[in-house]
Amino acid sequence: MKLVFLGPPGAGKGTIAVRITGILNAPHVSTGNIFREAIAAASPLGLKVKAVIDEGRLVDDGATIELVRKRLAQDDVKDSYILDGFPRTIAQAEALAGFSVVDRVINFDAPDSVVIERLSGRLVCRKCGFNWHKTFNPPEKDGVCGKCGGEIYTREDDRAEAVKKRLDVYREQTATLIEYYRKQGLLADIDASPDAGIVVENLRKLLQP
Ligand code: AP5
Ligand code: MG
Ligand code: ZN
């Protein structure tokens, strides 16, 4: 199954994708993760996008589309994938339609109060990328990832100012994709507010044939 995860920053797209990728046998493709890996590696792409991402603005459509087009041409995502964080603009959605046929678009629905609380407490593992949370899912040992022993940090774009910018960008450029995909009959809404385990269970039921 070819899925797109849509929703505001902090709705839990990445968290749920990591938990359900194995169940659905659909590789998790996150543009945010690809960009962060490029930044960590100080590659040309990483150097180019770092400032934009840290401020909470969108990377330009051209570079982002090209990246996803190449990734989706690989063999492991021939039959199924979870596309997390792409598309984020109408131009990206139109480009995607030109190189892949999406089966369902899941709209992670959560109010601002929930996403702000989640982002302000998020902790990320530098090594494996796992998302911890100060309150909802704290690592046992302070600053150390319980999955891989890696170092845990707070994302630059999870600072209050960048979070506000990301929410504005979402409203201005991305939220319009909800109606875009609803009109195509592809959209399914999911309440992203409950605990991650409950969201996974509800999504699994929703996707049952
Ligand atoms: P990206 O990495 O995609 O960031 P985002 O959309 O801002 O989303 P987040 O990763 O912040 O939120 P999420 O929904 O994945 O939440 P998470 O699961 O982590 O993109 C980063 C940047 O890259 C963008 O700002 C942009 O600059 C650039 N970019 C990426 N794609 C692009 C594109 N297509 N075009 C242009 N630019 C692009 O959860 C958050 C926290 O909440 C975690 O701590 C987690 O533990 C906790 N949590 C999650 N779910 C639950 C739950 N159900 N209950 C309790 N806690 C929960
Ligand atoms: Mg994410
Ligand atoms: Zn880790």
Image (cartoon, rainbow, N blue to C red):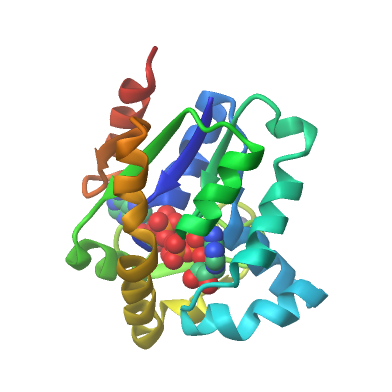
Q: Please indicate, yes or no, whether residue 134 appears anywhere in the rendered image.
A: no
Height in image: 24 above or below 100?
Answer: above
Q: Quadrant of ligand 3?
A: bottom right
Residue, x 46% and y 68% (percent of image)?
123
Residue, x 70% and y 41% (percent of image)?
72
Left or right position of 147 against 6: right
Residue, x 40% and y 49% (percent of image)?
6
**Closer to the camera, 18 or 209?**
209
Q: Position of residue 51 (x, y in %)?
A: 60, 86
Height in image: 63 above or below 183?
Answer: below
Q: Position of residue 84 (x, y in %)?
A: 51, 49
Would you identify the image quadrant in which residue 21 lies? top right
Left or right position of 162 against 33: left
Residue, x 28% and y 29% (percent of image)?
202
Name of the residue lying farthest toward the top: 209
Left or right position of 130 against 139: right
Q: Position of residue 56 (x, y in %)?
A: 46, 78
Quarter of the image where the C terminus is located: top left
Q: How many tags in the picture? A: 0
Q: Position of residue 17 (x, y in %)?
A: 48, 42
Q: Please indicate, yes or no, whether residue 183 appears anywhere in the rendered image.
A: yes
Height in image: 61 above or below 146?
Answer: below
Would you identify the image quadrant in which residue 150 lies? bottom right
